[in-house]
Amino acid sequence: MDSNNIKTVGVLTSGGDSPGMNAALRAVTRAAIYQGIRVKAIYRGYKGLIDGEVKEFTTQDVSGIIQRGGTIIKSARCPEFKTPEGRQKAYETLQREEIDALIVIGGDGTFTGGRLFSQEYDIPIIGLPGTIDNDLWGTDATIGYDTSLSTITECIDKLRDTATSHERVFLVEVMGRDAGFLTLNAAIAGGCEAAIIPERAPVPEQIEEAIGSGRRKSKNSSIVLVQEHAVEGGAKTVAEIIEKVHPEYSTRVTVLGHLQRGGSPSAYDRILASRMGVAAVQALLDGQRNVMVGIQNDDIVLVPLTKAIHQKKDIKEDSWEALQTLSI
């Protein structure tokens, strides 16, 4: 489709919510209207696209939401969108609503579905990386990551008060899907003894290193962060392993869960979401399609969705080394 023919853009949030999604929605809406483009918000992600839950937005619809966590247009998983029949229904909604292009805010699954949909029906799609996991290749940060990292760090600080009062190993389970960015950096920020993440050595070796850190400090209490999928069963499994191999240690498990997703977005996430939202609209006007808006060295960049989805984002080696060094 010729970018000059884009008169109406649809916007949706999909997958797990992240702080800053509302700021991104606000930016997309206002940037599009500024450019003379109508905006239609699609409720409940791809499910809403299939079911026709669509509402035209004005600037007033996004007033006062930049500071709110979650997403006012809701989010939902949608197995039906993975089927040709589901995507056909979604396309019929676009036709009925006269939507010429889509801006999708979400993570890996959101982009995978959007890219396939774009290829099948020749719909321009721009992705905004809204996920606390920070696992998308091509961007230094994703919308919501900074806020979630701060939330986890705050929880660690509170646990530290109890940890220093008891001779125990505190295991804190952190989200992250298949990536350890949140876990590693929260461990550094929280002054933790170790982080058990899927990108590093087998879990038994990481556990031994974690216990070793506590011994080097000549203490029996420590806080170890565990990425939720580093081992089947998460932090609970790690606790069982420690108590079996080292019965002299008493363990306590804290699963932060969805606490990590909530809360008002940080100033950084609000700014990031706003810049990315404006850039997404401009990308459509420039004739771009099937790209993700990212940020690299504080510059906005456009990354092909195929690379954002399929290329693996690596843990920073110096961050891992910093944690090992500082845990002595």
Image: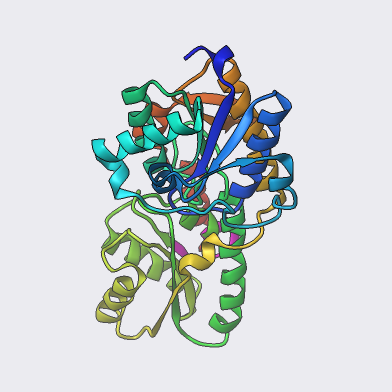
Between 249 and 86, the one lying in front of the other is 86
Residue 99 visible somewhere in the drawing: yes
Residue appearing at x 56%, y 20% in the figure: 6
In the figure, 79 relative to 256: above or below?
A: above
The x, y position of residue 153, in whole percent, is 59, 64
Looking at the image, the residue that sits furthest to the front is 96
Determine whether, in the image, residue 314 is placed left or right of residue 98.
left
Residue appearing at x 66%, y 46% in the figure: 23
Determine whether, in the image, residue 254 is placed left or right of residue 296.
left
Instruction: Give the quadrant of residue 91.
Output: top left
What's the image's color scheme? rainbow
Is 190 contained in the magenta span? yes
Between 129 and 213, the one lying in front of the other is 129
Determine whether, in the image, residue 293 is placed left or right of residue 233.
right
Is 297 contained in the magenta span? no
Instruction: Give the quadrant of residue 225.
Output: bottom left
The x, y position of residue 49, in whole percent, is 43, 42
Between 325 and 77, the one lying in front of the other is 77
Q: Which residues are magenta?
A: 187-194
Residue 324 visible somewhere in the drawing: no
Residue appearing at x 47%, y 53% in the figure: 75
The x, y position of residue 182, in whole percent, is 49, 54
Between 214 and 55, the one lying in front of the other is 55
In the figure, 262 relative to 125: above or below?
A: below
Q: How many marks?
A: 0
The x, y position of residue 298, in whole percent, is 65, 32
In the figure, 281 relative to 319: above or below?
A: above
In the figure, 231 relative to 269: above or below?
A: below
